[in-house]
Image: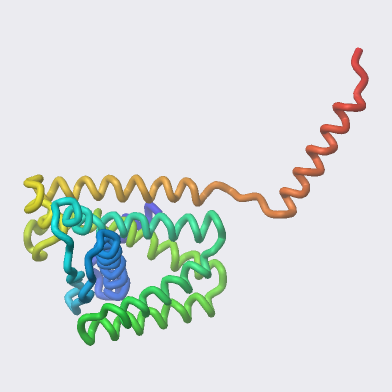
Amino acid sequence: MVALVVAGLWFWNAPWLAPLRLLVVLVHETGHALATLLFGGRVERVLLGADESGQCLSSLPAGWLPRIAVYSAGYVGSAISGALQLILAFRFRLHRAVLYAMGAWVAAMGVIYAGNGFTLGYCLAMGAVLLVLARVLPPGGVKAVVMVIAVFTGLYALFDLRDDLWRPGGGGPSDAMLLAAQTHVPALLWSLLWSVISVAVLAVAAAVSLRRVPSDGEEALEAVRSAAASGMRRTTPHP
């Protein structure tokens, strides 16, 4: 995971990572969409750009809290998505199901919310690729794909912070800038806050995922050992 984080920060702008970057952006925009629906708003459309920009255009209910929640939900959703992928794939060994679900989700986002032809084409193509990979890859390959996607989506805020530090204001209005406009807290602090939270969430998810789950055979053997030890305690005479 550390190697993936370093590689992501170093190679993030590499042309061959463009499909993955767009997938991360789609996860981010999905967080905005889910928060909008949760607070009673209406999602109009989701847009992805060939320049790897993303927008979730929504009608939000009035009030300060819904706006803060929806603006933050891109970062929050990315962190939670990465954590869930790791836990389901590695703790519960559902890596293939996770990849199938991701393929179906990407395709569904395109069909339901795509606001332009590029978004629809990308979602249908990437959804098909993920479904095919889930079908044909061996278990190790599926785990590797899920790990890469989970780490990159979970650390979206960290990449956003990097852009704020190196290219302040150069990438257009970000969620951190929208939050700053609502709260008067500098955008850089918002990016830093969500970056720290994202790293913490991913670290906790990794710790939970890496806890070894005994197999059925090991559990049965442990039960036999416990029963044998209990029998020995009952039959051992006391001095």
Rendering quarter of residue 101: bottom left
Question: The C terminus appears in which quarter of the rendering?
Answer: top right
Q: Nearer the viewer, residue 32 or 222?
A: 32
Q: Is residue 35 above or below residue 142?
A: above
- Identified at 23% across, 84% down, the residue is 118
Image-quadrant location for residue 75: bottom left
Q: Residue 5 at x, y = what percent?
A: 33, 55
User: Which percent across, then down, holds residue 199?
Assistant: 32, 48
Residue depicted at 18% across the width and 69% down the height: 58
Estimate the x, y position of residue 154 in percent, counting from the top left.
Answer: 33, 57
In this view, the residue in front, 50 or 78, is 78
Judge whether 231 appears above or below 153 on screen.
above
Residue at the limit of the structure toward the top, as seen here: 239
Q: Nearer the viewer, residue 223 or 163?
A: 223
Is 143 placed left or right of 48 in the picture? right
Pinpoint residue 67: horizontal percent, then vertical percent. 16, 56
Which of these two is toward me, 210 or 81?
81
Which quarter of the figure is the N terminus placed in? bottom left
**Residue 24 makes an appearance in the image:** no
Q: Residue at x 25, y 63 (%)?
A: 40
Query: What coloring was used for the rendering?
Result: rainbow
Q: Is 142 drawn above or below residue 182 in the view shown?
A: below
What number of labels is visible? 0
Q: Is residue 167 visible?
A: yes
Residue at the image position 35 percent from the left and 84 percent from the top: 125
- The image quarter containing residue 233 is top right
